Image (cartoon, coloured by chain):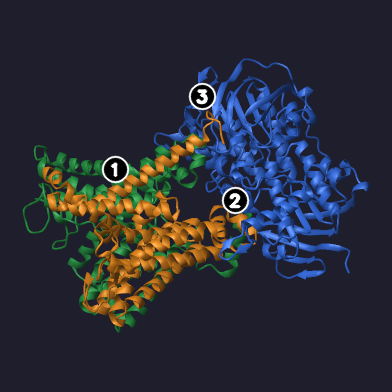
């Protein structure tokens, strides 16, 4: 404990800001993947699986083609395919969404394991110098500026893109025709139907975009956040994304803020490990934080709801 | 050219095993108000949902403005100028009134929605037909009457000249209904053709040009309003004459069984919050709660039965303080409860009739032996109940999901009344059931009262309230606006109180 | 009865389809599917060791699948069984190592009771969060599995470590008799079968079982008839946790004889699969658990005898579950229409 206090300024410093964002980015993508379907009232439990398939595809395609960009594109397509399997099952064949979502997660885990063995003849993980990573953006003029340089320089391309995506989805949900229809479909499908909106078509579209984002999440994880594929490398980030989506009420900006919290606990944990905290405690920290934050946000929502419902205070 | 804008011939529609429409006929002239009447379940709403393309027809033909419609969907119906105001409003609570109105037909400006243009377009209709609505409020914050106007504007915005209104007055006070009729007449003057679905004969006689009758999915003829009478229509609707009036016995109301003292009850809707209400029910009397749906009736009932928390005040049942006690405790203190929604609350639709009948007394003697459930005890009891309440089919091992509305409700009534509790809370006990079941249920309530139970009856049907109750309490926006003996009550004085009392005036329908 | 026949037919059809897709994958990597499946079958049944291994693998799956199913009956999607197995196992190990002051029969009981209590307490957390605050239990249970794994991993590599290279605990002083040596099949299988029979009876014949089913079908109705839906929900989750705890205890006392780090990985999710495939039907679940354990234990044999990676088996089960969840697949077109109409009517 003393060691931690003595090194307080080494743990909490400027680089922690980027470390937090860096840990949070894969979860942000995952959370956005879950948020878009949630707007259509579909709980995308399969986020984890979509992401894992995306991660594997990205590494494979980048390795064989030598292009990180093709890797990302292929990952997004693979994510969309997986997502469409779930969509068809859920929308066309009435699958319970949690059940088929867990099925998708299992499938992703198994098939990536299978393919790593079948394609690369390796077990557990695959890495190679031939895998082209997503480049980092170096802004030369920032090099000389002390704090800003440390904060913003050398971000991975997809990290910048995460910010663009948050803003884009916020705009899409709340300002465009498609977003209005999406929300109507999620909140009261019958009303949307009578307004002439093809409800299932909107749901499929939401699932498709969700798959693309989920695939991108995986690509970022395996080509940006790291440069390799490891069995089950998503390590429940998909579920953390779903938790963050609940926290933010499927609103992209609030959802992303929730992810930063998880990223923060992750990067703090990594630093604490250097000072004698057992690794298991460090590793479990983001999970505990996620459960705690999720619970607190639901309790807060509930008590806000109670307050709004109360007859004792005058309304409006 | 054809004189009709809509013609429906030889329509058949089945939902699984249930034949919703056996033989449907309907036509509509330009610029008329044509009423479609019939009992609950006669198939009138289904007919109009078929016209609007909500479901495909199994047989028959539909012609709109001379064009035979091979396939229909809401989208195609809208394109042909058909609009529908559904019984259950098709409005998204979390969106604003304006967003709801333009949903599906949003004007665009670049990538975004052009809200300014939308606003201008909507205001045009508001002014033309004198329909006030508040465009920037969320739907969850507006009153029922206003929501209905929003629905009408929605159909107009989509260019409808054929407008279907499915039981539009079911949720309105007589005064609000009158205001709606003015709007409908304005629309008619403007050349719109209107279909008015209802089972209230006095309204139908007031507003219609022509009237079509349906009974049990079949077409029973069309008459001009001037050539018919309520009696004639009743006969066509029901096939026989019925007298729902029950001989009332005002005698011996006894001890107070339920006492509510200044309770405050929360609710999601502002108008449904109960803010300080006191009332009592005595043994051997039926107290009717009259009010428009959504003015706190459901909240009051849920609070009494332990399903909703009470924020302030006390509820005393049979001498015991039951405020915020568990439903089980309250039932043990002497409560039976017929809930307003039999599908989600009253019954467990995936379990059998028998399992539903014993649900509330599972841990009692003949139904359980030791820790095991007793087959024999349950069978004997179910057999008795099925006979006594004429529940059909009589095989009590069938799931309740296979029962019609009336028989499903009989299961609920049988279970609750047979316990002979001191207080019976009956909420909308005859909503959506056939005439036979209505008679049986009303007689059952009357019998419970004669046997000494206190009955708290909540109903949106004024006729039911007046004919069954001894005493009537009227509520509006969570407050009691009047109380009277049933002998003094009529639709007019109750209707006025339902809008908030004599001083509420024309704006009484607005949300607070 | 007709319904039962139909469900069985559905399950068999799904099974054939999943094996078919698996065969395509095997073809795709240039192997012979028939050889692979034969090797799989042999790997599961051929000889005392292999059959015993299959039975030993079946024991925990039987318990975890019923654990998932009982929670599902109350309307919960309990992905957390795996964490409960871990915690049940570590508790049993702790008691089995340290409470030697107890007479042996009591020590057995204490191991099981302790495992059940700790696992039930762990299940209580997500259950209460869901019941009282609406926190999605799928998320919380999945995340808590990881926490449980790390807690046990910390304990066996720290305070409870045997000091060996592998993270594991000291051996327990009481073990369950292994009757098919050299395999690790043990009498725990009979305990598991007895427990499962009791749970199924409880669900169908007692008022508690009735309450669980009512809450699962329609919690709002349950509250109305005076059943405390929240309490019943939590109790069903805790029962589910206990079953997971028993599985953990049997694994530690019967299979390993000590707590082995990571030993339960996959036990919870495979149990969940077995239950989901048969739509949480309690009578079918044990058979599905058996089928999955055959696949699992045969997979190794297949990988050794042919060039097919054993991960293929997981792929097949995953495909199996995905198809099985599709309620309306395999219905003849006419029937589907009828069902769709039925839906419209209730809508």
Of circles 1 and 2, the one toward us is 2
Q: Are marks 2 and 3 on the same chain?
A: yes
CA–CA distance in space, label 1 to label 3: 37 Å
Q: Which residue is mark 2?
A: B92
In the picture, one chain is green; tell me its letter. Answer: C
Q: What colour has chain B?
A: blue
CA–CA distance in space, label 2 to label 3: 32 Å
Q: Which of A229 and B433 lies nearest the eye of the viewer?
A: A229
Could you tell whether A152 is left or right of A301 in the image?
A: left
Could you tell whether B254 is left or right of C121 in the image?
A: right
Q: What colour has chain A?
A: orange
Among all residues in the image, which is located at the extreme left?
C163
Chain where mark 2 sits:
B
Q: Which of C169 and B261 lies nearest the eye of the viewer?
A: B261
* Residue C331 in the image, given as x and y percentages of width and height: 53, 67
Local secondary structure at mark 3: strand
Q: Which residue is mark 1?
A: C120
| Residue B312: assigned label | 3
């Amino acid at each position: 404990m003393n060691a931690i206090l003595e090194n307080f300024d080494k743990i909490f410093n400027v680089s922690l800001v980027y470390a937090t964002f860096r840990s949070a980015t894969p979860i942000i993508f995952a959370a956005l993947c879950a948020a878009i379907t949630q707007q259509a009232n579909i709980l995308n439990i399969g986020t984890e699986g979509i992401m894992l398939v995306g991660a594997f595809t990205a590494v494979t395609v980048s390795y064989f083609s030598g292009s990180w960009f093709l890797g990302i594109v292929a990952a997004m397509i693979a994510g969309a395919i997986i997502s469409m399997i779930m969509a068809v099952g859920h929308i066309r064949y009435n699958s319970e969404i949690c059940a088929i979502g867990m099925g998708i997660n299992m499938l992703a885990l198994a098939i990536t394991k299978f393919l790593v063995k079948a394609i690369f003849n390796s077990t557990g993980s695959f890495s190679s110098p031939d895998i082209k990573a997503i480049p980092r953006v170096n802004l030369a003029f920032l090099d000389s500026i002390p704090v800003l340089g440390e904060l913003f320089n050398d971000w991975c391309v997809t990290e910048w893109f995460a910010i663009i995506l948050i803003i884009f989805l916020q705009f899409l949900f709340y300002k465009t025709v498609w977003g209005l229809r999406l929300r109507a479909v999620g909140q009261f499908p019958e009303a949307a139907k009578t307004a002439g909106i093809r409800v299932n078509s909107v749901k499929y579209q939401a699932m498709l975009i969700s798959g693309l984002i989920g695939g991108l999440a995986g690509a970022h994880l395996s080509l940006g956040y790291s440069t390799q594929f490891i069995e089950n490398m998503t390590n429940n980030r998909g579920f953390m994304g779903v938790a963050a989506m609940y926290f933010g009420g499927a609103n992209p900006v609030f959802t992303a803020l929730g992810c930063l919290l998880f990223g923060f606990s992750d990067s703090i944990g990594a630093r604490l490990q250097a000072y004698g905290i057992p690794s298991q405690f460090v590793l479990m920290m983001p999970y505990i934080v996620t459960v705690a934050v999720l619970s607190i946000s639901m309790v807060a929502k509930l008590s806000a709801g109670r307050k709004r419902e109360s007859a004792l205070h005058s309304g409006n | 050219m054809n004189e009709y804008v809509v013609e429906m011939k030889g329509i058949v529609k089945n939902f699984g095993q249930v034949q919703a429409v056996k033989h449907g006929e309907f036509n509509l002239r330009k610029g008329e108000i044509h009423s479609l009447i019939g009992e609950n379940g006669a198939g009138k709403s289904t007919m109009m949902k078929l016209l609007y393309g909500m479901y495909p027809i199994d047989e028959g033909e539909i012609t709109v403005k001379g064009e035979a419609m091979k396939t229909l969907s809401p989208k195609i119906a809208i394109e042909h100028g058909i609009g529908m105001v559904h019984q259950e409003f098709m409005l998204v609570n979390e969106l604003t009134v304006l967003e709801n109105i333009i949903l599906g037909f949003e004007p665009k400006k670049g990538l975004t929605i052009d809200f300014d243009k939308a606003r201008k377009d909507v205001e045009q209709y508001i002014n033309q037909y004198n329909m006030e609505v508040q465009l920037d409020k969320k739907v969850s914050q507006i009153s029922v009457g206003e929501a209905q106007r929003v629905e009408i504007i929605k159909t107009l915005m989509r260019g409808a000249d054929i407008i279907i209104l499915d039981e539009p007055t079911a949720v309105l006070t007589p005064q609000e209904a009158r205001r709606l009729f003015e709007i409908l007449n304005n629309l008619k003057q403007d050349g719109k053709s209107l279909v008015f679905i209802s089972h209230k004969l006095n309204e139908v006689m007031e507003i219609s040009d022509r009237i079509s009758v349906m009974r049990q999915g079949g077409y029973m003829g069309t008459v001009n309003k001037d050539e018919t009478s309520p009696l004639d229509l009743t006969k066509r609707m029901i096939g026989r004459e019925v007298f729902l009036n029950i001989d009332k016995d005002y005698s011996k109301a006894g001890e107070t069984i339920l006492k509510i003292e200044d309770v405050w009850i929360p609710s999601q809707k502002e108008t449904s919050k109960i803010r300080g209400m006191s009332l009592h029910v005595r043994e051997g009397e039926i107290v009717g709660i009259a009010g428009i749906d959504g003015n706190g009736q459901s909240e009051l009932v849920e609070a009494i039965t332990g399903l909703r928390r009470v924020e302030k005040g006390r509820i005393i049942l049979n001498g015991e303080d039951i405020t915020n006690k568990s439903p089980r405790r309250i039932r043990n203190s002497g409560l039976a409860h017929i809930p307003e929604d039999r599908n989600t609350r009253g019954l467990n639709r995936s379990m059998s009739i028998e399992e539903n009948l014993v649900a509330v007394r599972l841990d009692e003697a003949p139904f359980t032996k030791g820790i095991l459930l007793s087959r024999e005890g349950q069978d004997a009891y179910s057999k008795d109940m099925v006979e006594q309440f004429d529940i059909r089919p009589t095989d009590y091992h069938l799931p309740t999901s296979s029962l019609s509305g009336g028989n499903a409700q009989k299961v609920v009534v049988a279970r609750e009344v047979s316990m002979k509790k001191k207080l019976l809370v009956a909420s909308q006990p005859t909503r959506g059931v056939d005439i036979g079941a209505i008679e049986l249920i009303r007689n059952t309530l009357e019998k419970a009262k004669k046997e000494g139970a206190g009955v708290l009856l909540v109903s949106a049907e004024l006729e039911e309230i007046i004919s069954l109750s001894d005493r009537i309490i009227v509520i509006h926006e969570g407050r009691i606006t009047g109380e009277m003996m049933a002998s003094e009550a009529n639709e007019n004085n109750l209707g006025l109180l339902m809008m908030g009392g004599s001083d509420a005036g024309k704006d009484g329908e607005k949300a607070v | 009865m007709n319904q039962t026949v139909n469900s069985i037919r559905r399950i068999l059809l799904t099974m054939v389809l999943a094996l078919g897709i698996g065969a395509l994958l095997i073809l795709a990597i240039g192997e012979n599917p028939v050889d692979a499946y034969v090797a799989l079958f042999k790997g599961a049944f051929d000889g005392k060791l292999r059959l015993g291994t299959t039975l030993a693998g079946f024991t925990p799956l039987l318990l975890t699948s019923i654990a998932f199913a009982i929670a599902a009956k109350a309307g919960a999607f309990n992905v957390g069984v795996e964490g409960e197995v871990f915690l049940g196992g570590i508790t049993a190990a702790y008691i089995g190592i340290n409470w030697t002051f107890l007479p042996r029969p009591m020590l057995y009981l204490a191991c099981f009771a302790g495992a059940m209590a700790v696992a039930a307490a762990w299940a209580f957390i997500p259950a209460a969060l869901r019941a009282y605050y609406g926190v999605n239990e799928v998320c919380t249970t999945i995340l808590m599995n990881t926490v449980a794994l790390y807690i046990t991993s910390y304990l066996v590599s720290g305070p409870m470590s045997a000091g060996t290279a592998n993270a594991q605990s000291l051996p327990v002083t009481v073990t369950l008799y292994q009757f098919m040596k050299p395999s690790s099949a043990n009498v725990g299988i009979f305990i598991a079968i007895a427990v499962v029979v009791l749970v199924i009876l409880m669900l169908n014949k007692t008022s508690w079982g009735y309450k669980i089913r009512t809450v699962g079908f329609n919690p709002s109705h349950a509250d109305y008839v005076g059943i405390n839906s929240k309490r019943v929900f939590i109790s069903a989750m805790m029962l589910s946790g206990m079953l997971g705890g028993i599985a953990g205890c049997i694994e530690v006392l019967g299979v390993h004889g000590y707590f082995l780090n990571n030993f339960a990985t996959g036990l919870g999710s495979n149990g969940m699969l077995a239950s989901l495939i048969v739509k949480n039907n309690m009578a079918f679940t044990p058979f599905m658990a058996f089928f999955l354990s055959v696949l699992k234990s045969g997979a190794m044999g297949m990988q050794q005898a042919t060039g097919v990676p054993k991960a293929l088996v997981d792929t097949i089960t995953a495909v199996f579950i995905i198809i099985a969840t599709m309620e309306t697949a395999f219905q003849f077109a006419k029937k589907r229409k009828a069902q769709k109409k039925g839906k419209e009517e209730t809508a």
